[in-house]
Image (cartoon, rainbow, N blue to C red):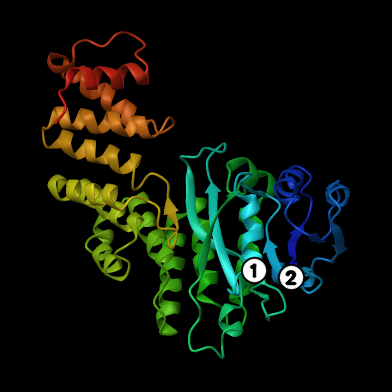
Amino acid sequence: MVDFRRLSLCMIVKDEEDCISRCLSSVEDVVDEMIIVDTGSSDNTVEICKSFGAKVLSFPWNGSFSDARNYGIERATGDWILWLDADEEVEASDVYKLRDILYSDDYFMSIHLINYYGDQPDPTKTFDIAHARLFKNNKGFKFNNNIHEMLNVNEVFADFDEIPALKTVPIKLYHYGYLDSMNESKKKFERNLSMLKKELKQKEYSPWIEYHIASEYYRAEKFDKAFDYVNRSIMGFLKELKTPPSLLYRLKYSILIKSGSIDGAWPGINRALTLYPDYVDLHFYKGLILYVKDMFKEALEVFDHCLDMGEDNLQHLTLQGVGSFQAMHYKGCCLEKLGEIEDAARSYAQAISLSDTFDSPVEALRELMIKNEDIFGKLPENCDNETLVTRVFLTISKP
């Protein structure tokens, strides 16, 4: 007898008519049921969901995203559950891989989450990470925390000798919720901060809450408050005798660099790197710190190391470019400071070739070539990027 296994999509929604069709269209051909919990939509969200054949359940908003999600998964009948948000979309060429996991012996799996930022979706402006989005039904999984909810993995595996390794399925999931337009229209900062500060009043709250508060303040460019809360979060994990997760250190040193507190970042970044030597973002920040401190040779070595590492390690939240075009740009900056003009130009040109939208190496290369007409010749007016790059490789012999 053939063992047919089923996949349930579980979501919570409220006033998502602008994006819900895109989300549901991306998975409608591979899921066996759609369980959608509506927490009070006043637009056409419910009607759109029903048009996809979804079972829409009403759940009065009680201030807890976890309660709403759990209400949905308790009513799912599939063998596996895929959970998504309305502002997400599964890559079309990957979506059928979701069926492959149904016969796995694993309890839960992650997929490649791609978070866009900026004014519009740009494949070179993303934060990438492996994120647990698939889990077996009827194994005790549920969500905890009223906001920034997380699966209760420790509870499910409490009787196991150790928590099984989380496998990553090669499926891309695009998240549009951090785009400027989405943040402004949803007024996420005010909503999230209010909910998170309520969580702080709970007798026992997770150090993750302070991290998420720090992240909200960071996005609002309130760096003093962001730094205070990220340090509280780090201390919270240490008090629980846990190693603070890598993205806390990423946020901490990003805050210090953004706010110009280089002395506060050096040499502390090295201690973070002893904990997470495989985290390219931390190496990149070390390179930036060394560069600002005029330690150009040392910074150059670090940026070369970033290029060697690349940015494919999805176990850490990784900024697109820190192992490619951004590291290559700063390699050019170091070389220029060291007087190695031709190598600097080559690095800038390579950085331009790796990203169509990263403007810093374009400006740097143009200025470098104008200052060094004896090497590159006079640039034509309105010189475009392609002409700049071509001029470099025609003028400079290969190493």
In the picture, the disc for residue 206 is none
Q: Residue at x 61, y 67 (%)?
A: 196
In whole angstroms, how far apart are the C-alphas of marks 1 and 2?
A: 9 Å
Q: Residue at x 27, y 31 (%)?
A: 348
Q: Position of residue 185 (x, y in %)?
A: 68, 44
Secondary structure beneath disc 1? helix
| Residue ranking furthest to the front | 1
Q: Position of residue 312 (x, y in %)?
A: 40, 53
- Side (left or right) of 158 relative to 369: right
Which quadrant of the view contains residue 281? Answer: bottom left
Q: Which circle, 1 or 2, is nearer the viewer?
A: 2
Which quadrant of the view contains residue 66? Answer: bottom right
- Side (left or right) of 117 relative to 389: right
Which quadrant of the view contains residue 179? Answer: top right
Disc nearer the start of the sequence (1/2):
2
Mark 2 nearby-residue class (10 Å; few <14, some 14–19, many ≥20): few
Does residue 356 appear in this view?
A: yes
Looking at the rendered structure, the kind of residue marked 2 is Asp
Image quadrant in which the C terminus is located: top left
- Side (left or right) of 185 relative to 393: right
Image quadrant in which the N terminus is located: bottom right
In the picture, the disc for residue 3 is 2
Secondary structure beneath disc 2? loop
- In the displayed structure, would residue 25 be above or below residue 108? above
Instruction: Provide the residue designation for mark 1.
Output: 103
Q: Residue at x 62, y 60 (%)?
A: 100
Looking at the rendered structure, the kind of residue marked 1 is Tyr
- In the displayed structure, would residue 352 be above or below residue 22? above
